[in-house]
Image (cartoon, rainbow, N blue to C red):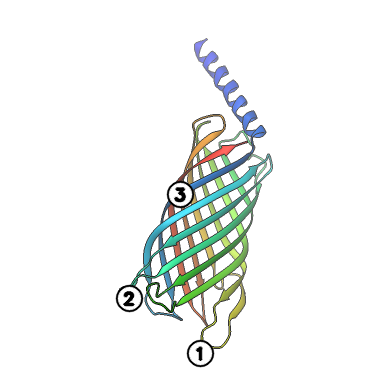
Amino acid sequence: MKASLKALLCAVAMTGFFRVEAQQNRFLGISAGVAPLQIKDQFHSPYTYRGTGLNLQATFGQERTKTQWQLDAGYTQANPQSVVSRKASTRLFDLILNYHWRLFPASQPENRLQYFGGVGLRLFGNATNYSPDSEVATVQATAAISLGASARVSYRLNPVHRLQIQAFASVVSVVYRPDYDYNGKEHLAASWLGKSPILALEASYQYRFSKKYQATCRYQMNYFRYDQPRSVLWLGQSVSMGIQRSF
């Protein structure tokens, strides 16, 4: 009798929780953390610049029965350094939009394990001053916009704890590389299907501590490589913590 009563109470609690989720499916969050960074701009220097900076990020999105979308805006500032040169000053900006559909008929909202697939749009820019202490700045800028495939797996341990993994791979990208004095012009080119890839991976943990608020912990990795004629390799990571509100 006691076991049946406990099972009934658990079922009622879970039903009430998912009804709250259905009503409060929009969310807004902010987070901050540390961001290890590697940049190798071979058109400027054959050496890799490494450093750790500060990362700030804002998130806004919506979860529905069959679809979900999420918009992330991030800013990173760091002072990377190579083995033979002084520190540079780097600023990174990114804007990420992911739109997912719920996959498989068995992947219902009440299931703990959820699969999502869809498209992602990423816009990022990087401005690096390689001589921040000099009167004549040496600023190199790179920007890219990419459309690609995005996927997410979500596992809810219980109404309080949830784990998520998300991945992105570019399909088509447009890349901007700066003007160099001896080259005479800026460079703008398109790439697709694995050439000059933009890849991203994210793992997150969410802890709901009230009806409308949850704490978040997130690891992100972003990789970008652009080949000739102006090669650049960029690897950014971040570990951040924040808070998210449902409404």
* Residue that label 2 marks: 85
Count neighbours of disc 1 (C-alpha within 10 A) and say few if under 14, some if 14 to 19, many if 20 or more.
few
Contact (CB < 8 A) between labels 1 and 2?
A: no
Q: Position of residue 92 (x, y in %)?
A: 49, 63
The residue lying at 40 percent from left, 72 percent from top is: 132
* Residue that label 3 marks: 32
Instruction: Give the amino acid at mark 2.
Output: Ser
Farthest front residue?
A: 135
Secondary-structure class at tag 3: strand
Q: Which mark is residue 182?
A: 1
Q: Quadrant of the C terminus?
A: top right
Spatial separation of the CA atoms under disc 3 and disc 2:
29 Å
Spatial separation of the CA atoms under disc 1 and disc 2:
22 Å
Farthest left residue?
A: 83
Q: Position of residue 202 (x, y in %)?
A: 50, 52
Count neighbours of disc 3 (C-alpha within 10 A) and say few if under 14, some if 14 to 19, many if 20 or more.
many
Q: Earlier in the sequence, mark 1 or mark 2?
A: 2
Q: Position of residue 177 (x, y in %)?
A: 55, 77
Q: Say above or below: 96 vs 217.
A: below
